[in-house]
Image (cartoon, helix red, strand yellow):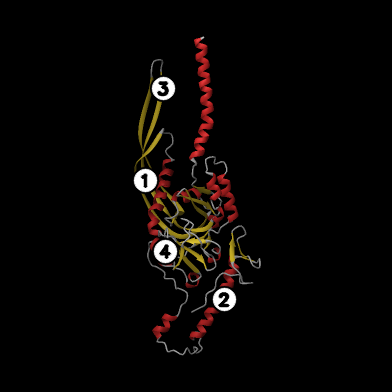
Amino acid sequence: MAETTNYQCPNCGGQLNFIGKTGMLHCDFCDSDFTPAQVEQIYAERQAKDDARAAKERGDDGTAPKPTGKHMSAAEASTSETTRVHVHRSTSTDPVQAYLENSRWENVDEENMRAYNCSSCGAQLMVDQVTAVTSCPYCGNNTVLPGQLSDVLKPDYVIPFKMSKDDAVQALQEYYKGKRFLPDSFTNQNHIEEMQGVYVPFWLYTGQADGDITFSGEQVTTWSDSQNSYTQTDVYELRRAGTLNFTKVPVDGSTRMPDTHMDAIEPFDYGELTDFSVAYLPGYITDRYDQDVLECDPRARGRVENTCTSSLQNTTGGFSSVSVNAAEISIDWSQVSYALLPVWMLHTRWNDTDYLFAMNGQTGKLIGDLPIDNGKVTKRFLTICVPLLVVIILVIQFLLGGYTA
């Protein structure tokens, strides 16, 4: 078996963490910095040496294999070898099926990853060998148990974290400002320092949509004369047809991440999509998808259908209102890919209610649920309304007194 290595500092062996603002892997022990490409090259060379040594031990390099003291059959010898997985190229014309058959982890990468399973919400979290997971970013559960990676596809792309943890904490603190009805105990007890960087799994769909839609358009005309006002409503049947191309329509593959949160922190800048490398993962958690590309397909089609309908409806100008009568939209995917997108997350509880905050790790756009202190609402109401009510009573008494006089 070829030896595998972790992404540790080539200089001192310390832990490497990916720093989004610099785009470098940084060692906290010797203060060295490396680009992901440099680290990949270093470890590729080490892996090549390990493979060569293992091949020599097996005799694959033309030399006699070293005696092991145990005779193995050919079948046993073949099954004892662990090498990189050979990618099977599918002949399927369906891009989704072809993707599922072609995209698998190589052993060298998979062995550098660990899995943790949340006993509360069931999330499976993946990290590199040196990153610790102390709590689940989705439900806050502290009982996160080691697990095994199983049937996981290798991502095609990654958008590296650009916003740091300090940026995320500051953004959340700014988010709290101006919220008059936010409970004081919530901000005091909320452990914002526990925000975690999570690579959220996304399926990206590329394809073409052909739409043929019939609309009902109403044109309302009003006029009046010296005696009456008139309204005339003319109804027209409108037909629009067209073809739209879509590139990388995103759908997150995690049921634990609310769709409303994901939609709210979009868009991501796809110009920074990078070919996947485990070099971008140190220091962050990677969520394993629990909805595969086939399960997410209906939502992707729904997003495309809504956009197609809206785009064709925008060509029906000049009417007071327009509604859809009938729609035929066919969608053909030409490509599907799997990407990890950066999100800073914090789960917290207050008064037995869960609150989840999410921030786009690339752009800094933030969304979160906030509680309301009913006591503060009541106090605010009384502060405004009681003085106003007193003034109204005094004014009424004055008017009544003046009238009586």
Residue beneath disc 2: 46
- Measured Cα–Cα span from mark 2 to mark 1: 57 Å
Q: Which mark is residue 223?
A: 3
* Element under disc 4: helix
Question: Disc 1 designates what residue?
Answer: 212
Query: Viewer-proximal residue, 381 or 280?
Result: 381
Give the vertical position of 384 relative to 118 (above or below).
Answer: above
- Place of residue 346 in the rendered image (x, y in percent of width and height, measured from the top left): 51, 53
- Secondary structure at badge 3 equals strand
Q: CA distance from mark 3 to mark 4?
A: 62 Å
- Mark 3 vs 4, N-terminal side: 4
Residue at label 4?
Answer: 99
Looking at the rendered structure, the kind of residue marked 4 is Tyr
Q: Please name which of the two marks, 3 or 2, marks the residue nearer to the observer.
A: 2
- Disc 3 marks a residue whose amino acid type is Trp
Asked if disc 1 and disc 3 are in contact, CB closer than 8 Å, the reply is: no
Q: Nearer the viewer, mark 4 or mark 2?
A: 2
User: Badges 4 and 2: C-beta atoms under 8 Å apart?
Assistant: no
